[in-house]
Image (cartoon, grey):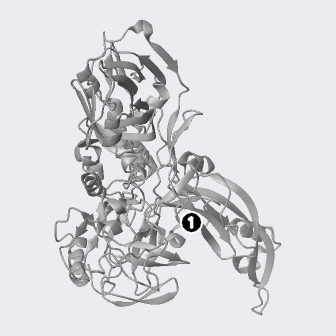
Amino acid sequence: MRIIIDKGILELPEDFSFEIEKTSSVFSEQGEQSIPVSLPATPHNLSLLGQPLRPERSMRYLRKIPALLEAGVLIRKGTLIISKYSSDGITASMVFSESVIYSKYKDVSLREIFKDENRLDYSTPVKWAEYLVKVYNGMVPEYDFAVFPVLVNKSDDTFFILNEPDPDVQSSLLSAARTVTVDGGTEEVPDGYGLTVFLYLRRLVALLFSRMGYSIGTSAIDDSYFNRVVVLNNNADTICDGTIHYADIVPSCTVAEFLEWMEAKFGIYISVSTDGTTVDLRALKDIYSSSPDMDLTGKADKSDMELSVDEPGHVVLKPDTSLDGAAPAAETFQELRDRHDCAISMDEYMFSRWTEILPSTLRLRTLICRLALGEYYELGNDENGMTLSRVGSDYFNADSGATDNPQERTPADPIPPLYAYDRGSKSGDVITALYIGERRHSRTSVAGSSESGYEQKIMIAADAGFTIWDERHRTAHRLGTVRGRDNLGRYLENVPELLPDAIFNNFFKEAEYAALNCNVSIKLTPSLPPHSLLSFGTLCAKQFGGARLLPKTMKYSVGKVSACGECEFALLQDYEDAQQSALPGHTFTGIYFYWKYCCDGTAAMDAWIAEQPAPDYIDNPRWEWAEEPRDGAVMLPYPSKAGLIDGEHKRQGRVWYRNKNEESLQQHSALLEGDAWYESVPLVL
């Protein structure tokens, strides 16, 4: 066995060995690493390591050293981590594959990784602005990024717009040096200010691993679901110095935080090849449904097998709804549906005219869903008539509630809310866009600050193409969204929905089945040859008799004799009595009928006339209601069909008439009670 570092080969005892534990990234970020051992502190080893026992040495101490481990046919690239030096020995361990990524890049920011990744196509902000307008209009192919408006710096009911559509020039963007209004104040900004670009998630991932020295093999990001998905940024001066610096437009997080986000958000895990040069990105849905790549049948003694049973659970996707306007109307959709048994869904055309089209006798607290923005409102009333009160967004937790053991995933990306922002510069000048927080400066000094203290969190959206024209959206603009709908609230083809329920249904149904039913862990000690130790992938199932096993941990020793130790697996089976669960679809019972207020005084007037001593002398009788109608919102349950009657009551009225025996035109009246009631009729919007 040999350990080779850049200075030479370390001396090892003849019987020296490493005990290595390999952990699946699905179950741990530990990766593959050895148990710490003591290397001999020989003069040769101390020399190769720079004489670490001499405090007066001129070179700093390195804790992590690239190394190559050779043990027969088993050859692994990794990192030697040294934690202690003494004359009695050198305490060290080896890490491999994905462990290297997590250890080497754990605290390195994406901005540090991308600091030398620049686009130099043009040299001035004016030329870049011209190009970005072409990208915005789909006139040129651009594979790195997309351009569409986003809102920043919310102040009361106003925003600053990045990539702001020009209100006077169709299909153009504001970019010239100008005076802008932000947070109630004015600022002078240079050419190019306010334009930025949003990297495609797929491109960001490819560049990230490339800059870390890895090529990508299998990639779950290649799924068509991600074709339009971009990573947002709040940088207001991206092109102001004539160069697009990718470090300015990537999130402020570290590499480890970004990888953890991919795991929590989409269930995408990394696996690094044994030669340490290729990384695979595999989705949990594919991992759980994968065909076995190795047969362990007959290679482990069943008599030594140990099974443990855990509590069944279920997957919960819990989004970050901290941005202003993102808080949901309830924690889950089921909770909202339990409070409201039915609702009215409105596209943007209907919602803009709700006061005209909603009957005044709709039930109090009727729920209205604004499809375009994903907002819920409750119907109320006051002295001026009907009112709508915003309850919250539809950014619910994805939670089937199938067990009492939720397995929460909380990705660290705030979901940006959609606003229909009326700029007010002219009629129909509404910009529908995502709000992403405060703007940031990287290359200019605006308002006395070269860079605001606001850091850009990971935030994603989908490029949905141009908005649909209507009376409120006369300025067509490109739409970024998380909802998979256009600006009027209609579903779009080939535009992914990025809300928790949709992500759950796309990426976590297999994980939900496993959490509910595959709650058994199996420990085995298979007999594997050295080459199988190298090819033992943890993100693919293994066959064991008639069962599929997904590796959790694998222990093996490397030395004069390499051997597999105890391995732990999750048992994946399709059970006949499997528990099933599903998220409730975001649909309410529709409201097809409502209670219309009806009243009639004719019968009361006719009966009164008939009772008079000389009814023929009653001239020109007419009915007038003396009491206000009860035609406001009611609390009756919604009717199930037309023609039903409820809430019958009396309403005061007055009959006016003249007496034919009188020569004067004097009007007489009598106070009576007419009939009033509610009748169920079809609701037509």
Closer-to-camera residue (594/589): 589
Q: In the shown orientation, is residue 9 left or right of residue 347?
A: left
Is disc 1 placed on a helix, strand or loop? loop
Q: Position of residue 251 (x, y in %)?
A: 39, 62
Q: How many numbered dots are placed on residues in this image?
A: 1
Residue extending furthest toward the right: 613
Residue where numbered disc 1 is placed: 359
Q: Position of residue 115 (x, y in %)?
A: 31, 65
Residue extending furthest toward the top: 303
For the question of whether residue 468 can be seen, the reply is no
In which quadrant will I find the N terminus?
A: top left
Closer-to-camera residue (130/61): 61
Q: Is residue 460 above or below residue 171?
A: above
Residue at screen point 38% across, 8% down? 301
Closer-to-camera residue (205/483): 205
Instruction: Write down the quadrant of residue 168 in the picture.
Output: bottom left
Q: Position of residue 197 (x, y in %)?
A: 30, 69
Q: Is residue 646 above or below residue 168?
A: above
Instruction: Write down the quadrant of residue 192 in the picture.
Output: bottom left
Q: In the shown orientation, is residue 272 left or right of residue 38?
A: left
Q: Position of residue 256 (x, y in %)?
A: 41, 50
Q: In the shown orientation, is residue 312 left or right of residue 144?
A: right
Residue type of the residue flagged with mark 1: Pro
Residue at screen point 57% across, 48% down? 337
Q: Is residue 177 above or below residue 460?
A: below
Residue at screen point 30% across, 31% down? 11
For the question of whether residue 500 can be seen, the reply is yes
